[in-house]
Amino acid sequence: MRLAAVLFLPALAVPAQAAPAVFVEANPSTVRAGDQLSLRASCDDNLKAATVTAGPIGSVPVEPEFGFLTATVKVPTGQKAGDYPVVLHCPDGKSASTTLHVLAKVEPSRGPATGGGGTAPERTARLLIGGGLTVMTAAAVLALVSARRRQAAR
């Protein structure tokens, strides 16, 4: 009983840290132009919709879902790269902010230079497929012969 009191009393002495009541998150916080992102926010009353504004996405309503205010949005494909403030506007006048990092959408012009192309499907594909089938057939025949020898030895 004393041990339980010794372990329990220090826990009472440390005040619990309260989570911030008003916040906004962009997930992921770094996106390429044209990608989707999820917004998650919280006001003092998460039963009422609020509004999130950001340069790339404009003004977006965040609706109550699972105890938070959420929305999914798409950054326009032609959006310029940069850092943009994301601001939550709660119905009671409180606000919170975070930063959204938008990267330019860059498509590679060609594949990486990784070698001589020894497994390219031109000349070697038939050889690889034929060799694989030959090995599998030989393994099946060997298994059959082995099984018959075991039965004959009994």
Image (cartoon, grey):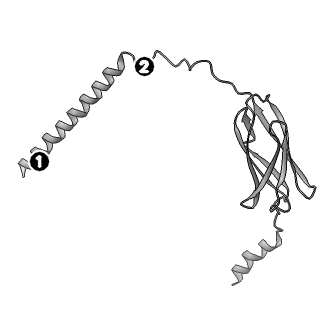
Residue 50 in which image quadrant: bottom right
Name the residue that disc number 2 marks: 120
Given residues 80 and 146, the one toward you in this image is 80
Q: In this rendering, is residue 102 above or below 50?
A: above
x, y percent for residue 82: 81, 31
User: Could you tell me if the residues under marks 1 and 2 are in contact, i.e. CB atoms within 8 Å?
Assistant: no
When asked about the image quadrant of residue 42, the answer is bottom right
Residue 30 vertical position relative to residue 118 in the rendered view, above or below: below
Residue 9 appears at what percent x and percent y?
A: 78, 76
Residue at 90% across, 52% down: 95
Residue depicted at 9% across the width and 44% down the height: 149
In the current view of this chain or complex, which residue is farthest to the right?
Answer: 93
Type of amino acid at the residue the image marks with label 2? Ala
Q: Does residue 52 appear to the left or right of 145 in the view shown? A: right
Q: Residues within 10 Å of mark 2 (few under 14, many from 20)?
A: few
Label whose residue precedes the other's in the sequence (1 or 2): 2
Q: Residue at x 70, y 79 (%)?
A: 4
Q: Nearer the viewer, residue 13 or 53?
A: 53
Q: State the image coordinates of residue 90 (x, y, percent, origin top left).
A: 88, 55
Q: Which residue is mark 1?
A: 150
Look at the numbered disc 1 and give the secondary structure of its residue. helix
Q: Residue furthest bottom?
A: 1
Label 1: few (<14), some (14–19) or many (≥20) C-alpha neighbours in 10 Å: few
**Can you give x and y, in whole percent of width and height, for residue 109 in the image?**
62, 18
Which residue is nearer to you in this view: 15 or 71?
A: 71
Query: Label 1 sits on what residue type?
Result: Arg
Which of discs 1 and 2 lies nearer the camera? The answer is 2
State how far apart marks 1 and 2 are (Cα): 43 Å
Quadrant in which the N terminus is drawn: bottom right
Q: Assign a secondary structure to mark 2.
A: loop
